[in-house]
Amino acid sequence: MSAFITRCVHAGRSDLKPRGVHAPPIDLSSTNPLVGIDSGGEAYERLASGQHGSSEKSHVYGRLWNPTVARFEEALAELEGCAQSVAFASGMAALAACLLATAQDGGGHVVGIRPMYGGSEHLLQSGLLGTQVEWTTAERLAGVIRPDTGLVVVETPANPSLDLVDIGEIVSCADPVPVLVDNTFATPVLQRPATLGAQLVLHSATKFLGGHGDVIGGVVATNDVWAARLRRVRIVTGGILHPLAGYLLHRGLQTLSIRVLAQQEGARSVAGWLHAQPDIVAAVHYPDEHRLQTDLDGQMSGPGSVLSFEVRGGRRAAAQVAMSCRLITHAVSLGGVDSLIEHPASLTHRIVDPACAPSDALLRLSVGLEDPADLIADLAHGLDQARAMLANRTVPGTP
Ligand SMILES: *Cc1c(COP(=O)(O)O)cnc(C)c1O
């Protein structure tokens, strides 16, 4: 098999040459001509039961199957080392489909390992989709698995604390309950949970897979049985990815490896610099490379490009830093080519139970492809503003 970076470039494109095209065609058809009533009905039946649609003569209707989306799915499955993947209109739609499929299967008890992305925590906590969550930690997992446990949900590294858990250990404690790993932060470039036994690997494709801040999507890489279940849910609930988004995500995969590795280099520099500002930065949260290689047996090949840090002076000082950055955009989301900074406690994790919510002093930084020296200069300015605010003076040269 060719190298990972080569597969990023070529995956999901094997039908292009025979068609005489170089870039994947964008198929925007909302409906498809039917060959006949009987064959159309049979195709409908097969697709609605979650079967793979690549061999169908007619895809019947755009909510059932789309070839542009299917190419992206094939590519992502290959990169994650899974049989298939199923793409959704957003990361949350992807998680919702996993929960609906779990509830339908009779496994209404879902175990969530904290911490995780605020939206995921909120969806699990709501019980909206027929599952009932029990929160635990990686260490206590084995004790909470019940006969009706249908799914274990974990995120590593976690948003926004960058906490890590040992995927192999979670899988063996949960056995035979399937484990869903949210791999949004690591991407398959750095970590492939399916190779460690996870049955479901979820992405907010909005983040690194798209990588340019211009598409919302979600995807779950999994085995054949789960893929059929998820497609069935997707067809009845309508959360399919739009073909234009599918095209952009497929294109994003071509540069995924090079972006993730270059952004990681930038993040290493920025994290190192933040560590050296202890008078104003109380803590830096960034995966420890030594621990990754030793305790975690290299489950993630590098620390990635998202980090968070706590500013001395609490919420006011954190707000000052976020608002003072000029190159780094103050905005939610992450994983794109441009750097973003945000305050989880008031935004992405606002709805999280206060007992386990992120600190008010915490800022999350997604490092993009800019020269790290420019990012550091921007952060230095922001931190100076916070220092000045705390000392109750103004910094020369500020409007
Ligand atoms: C953003 C995010 C999600 C939600 O994805 P959307 O595409 O915004 O619906 C889920 N998990 C993690 C880790 C995220 O960062």
Image: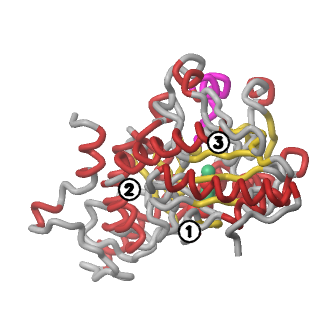
Q: CA distance from mark 2 to mark 3?
A: 38 Å
Could you tell me residue 78's position as x and y percent? 34, 44
Direction from residue 359 to residue 92 in the image, left or right? left
**At 30% from the left edge and 54% from the top edge, which residue is drawn?**
254
Observer-side mark, 1 or 3, equals 3
Q: CA distance from mark 1 to mark 3?
A: 48 Å
Query: Is residue 174 covered in magenta?
Result: yes
Sequence-wise first label, 1 or 3: 1
Observer-side mark, 2 or 3, equals 3
Q: Quadrant of residue 15?
A: bottom left
Tell me the kind of residue under disc 3.
Answer: Leu
Label 1, on which residue?
Answer: 236
Could you tell me residue 280's position as x and y percent? 77, 45
Q: Quadrant of residue 136?
A: top right
Q: Is residue 95 above or below residue 139?
A: below
Under 8 Å from ligand 1: the CB of mark 2? no
Mark 3 surroundings within 10 Å by alpha-carbon count, few (fewer than 14), some (14 through 19), many (20 or more): many
Sequence-wise first label, 1 or 2: 2
- Return the residue nearer the eye: 225 or 158: 158
Could you tell me residue 218's position as x and y percent? 52, 59
Label 2, on which residue?
Answer: 73
Mark 2 surroundings within 10 Å by alpha-carbon count, few (fewer than 14), some (14 through 19), many (20 or more): many
Label 3, on which residue?
Answer: 274
* Label 1–label 3 contact, CB within 8 A: no
Q: Is residue 388 visible?
A: yes
Q: How is the image coloured?
A: secondary structure
What is the magenta range? 168-181
Q: Is residue 93 visible?
A: no
